[in-house]
Image: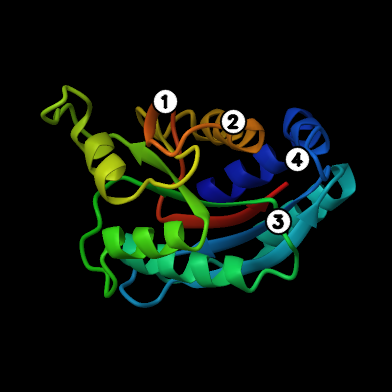
Amino acid sequence: ALQKEGIALAVTDPVIVSAVQAGARRKVAIAYVEWGTPGAPRLVVDWTIIGDKASAESFAATLLAAPRSAQSYNAIGDAIALATNLIQKCPCRPMRSVIDISGDNRDLRSLIPAPLARDVAIGAGITINALAILQDDRRGESGKPLLVEIYEREVAGGPGAFVYVAQDRRDFTRAIRRKMALEISMRGSDRPRTLPALSGPYRRAQAAARD
């Protein structure tokens, strides 16, 4: 419930709606996927065009009303594979395509390993951004949080890709709102970067065709 409520609040936030309307096409297409169980990510909300307050509120209402799917952990690669397929079948012609992956652990049990699924997505012209929700103080070789390094290496990729860092769950709504605003407005290189965040959702892939 926390994830859905956070997404619903973020999508309907006036700052997000204004960012969408400031884009070249003044609208985005969003689909919502729940994931975790190997080979069994599930489309919860199909492609929805958001371009104003009314369409944002309609998406949010549909999301909140949808039953939660039964998921275990932690098949990131299979989530990326489904999101890639969804974007390729999107009934629109986006100028930019983005997959959002949020999680608190590395890819553990995917039938399609995350790096392989990521590379296929990048080959299809899709950017993958990641939100790393930290659970401990472990650091990688670069001095960054270990999970951030893993997501930079195995998950994020494509033009403008970044990893957004969440310290815990408590500021989830604020974090996802900020991340969404950043993604809608971003342009940049294809090198994965790390950006600070406050919190984020769990076991969710959000496939989004941007303006």
Q: Which circle marks residue 12 in the picture?
A: 4
Q: For the point 59% across and 33% down, which residue is it?
A: 187
Q: Which residue is mark 1?
A: 195
- Quarter of the rendering containing residue 135: top left
- Residues marked 2 and 1 touching at CB (< 8 Å): yes
- Quarter of the rendering containing residue 10: top right
State the CA–CA distance, disc 2 to disc 1: 10 Å
Q: Is residue 202 above or below residue 172?
A: below
Q: Which residue is mark 3?
A: 94
State the CA–CA distance, disc 1 to disc 4: 23 Å
What amino acid is found at the position of numbered circle 2 in the picture? Leu
State the CA–CA distance, disc 4 to disc 2: 15 Å
The nearer-to-camera label among 3 and 1 is: 3
**Label 1 vs 4, first from the N-terminus:** 4
Q: For the point 36% across and 69% down, which residue is it?
A: 78
Left or right, 80 with reference to 31: left
**Label 2 vs 1, first from the N-terminus:** 2
